[in-house]
Structures are given as structure tokens and as C-alpha cells.
Image (cartoon, helix red, strand yellow):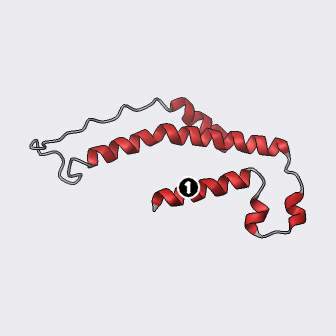
Amino acid sequence: MKTLAKAVTASVLVLILQGSAPYLLGTSAVQAQSPPDATVSDAAMGKMNTYVEFLNQTLRASESLQRYDSWVDMKKGPTGKERIIYGMYSLYDVRELAGKALASAQ
């Protein structure tokens, strides 16, 4: 269910960035037919790409935590008797991407 919600949200964001939002919002076709300003669209797309790149690189941390959660009781911690132990994923250095995302937000 979460995957479907993420897919719908991503699709709506793409439509908004492509200038198709008037159709989604039910505004008149006359407004929808006017071409979007290319400069604004390019800037918005660049900003969105920065956020998506940052999100993709940071998802590895939550995936690593989910993998740890798959074999250990998160409230008690490891017992030392686990038969299957999965290691943690290596993480990416996202300091530069975090800076870009913060700069895009301003």
C-alpha cells in the first residue's frame, strides 16, 4: 500500500512539473493549453532532481535498518543466539547532496 501511495505521489509531482496540473485540478482547458514557462519548468525539474538524488542515496540507511530489524528484536537487541545474521549495508556519503538539497530549498 505504501508503494502505491509513493507511486501516485511521484506521478502527480511529475504531472505538475510537466504543466499538466490544470487537468488534475479541474481548471479550464484554455488555461491548460497555455505553454508553461520553460525557464520555470527547467528550474523546478532541476530542484526536483536534486531532491530525488538525495532521497535515493539516503534510502540505503533505512533499508539497512529494516534489514537489521528482520533478524533482531529492536526492543531487546541481539541475544547472541540468532541463527541468521545479516550484515548492515554500506552507506553513501551524502554530505554534498545534503548541501545541494538545502541550497535548492532556499
Residue at 57%, 38% in the rendered image = 53
Instruction: Report the quarter where the C terminus lies.
Output: top right
**Left or right of residue 66, residue 79 in this image:** left
Residue 102 visible in this rendered orientation of the protein? no
In the image: residue 36, left or right of residue 90: right
Q: What amino acid type should be assigned to the residue bearing mark 1?
A: Ala
Quarter residue 48 falls in: top right
Picture layout, residue 85 above or below residue 75: above
Identify which residue, 97 or 35, lies in the foreground: 35
Quadrant containing the N terminus in the rendered view? bottom left
From this viewpoint, which residue is outermost toward the left?
Answer: 81
Q: Is residue 57 left or right of residue 26?
A: left
In this view of the protein, which residue sits in the foreground, 73 or 103? 73
Question: Residue 40 sits in which quadrant?
Answer: top right
Q: In this rendering, is residue 4 above or below 52?
A: below
Circle 1 packing at 10 Å, graded few (<14), some (14-19), many (20+), is few
Secondary structure of the residue carrying numbered label 1: helix
> Mark 1 = which residue?
7
- Horizontal arrangement in the rendering, residue 46 relative to residue 62 (left or right): right
Tell me which residue sits at (38%, 44%) in the image. Answer: 63
Q: Position of residue 43 (x, y in %)?
A: 75, 41
> Is residue 79 something one can see in this rendering?
yes
Q: Position of residue 69 (x, y in %)?
A: 27, 49
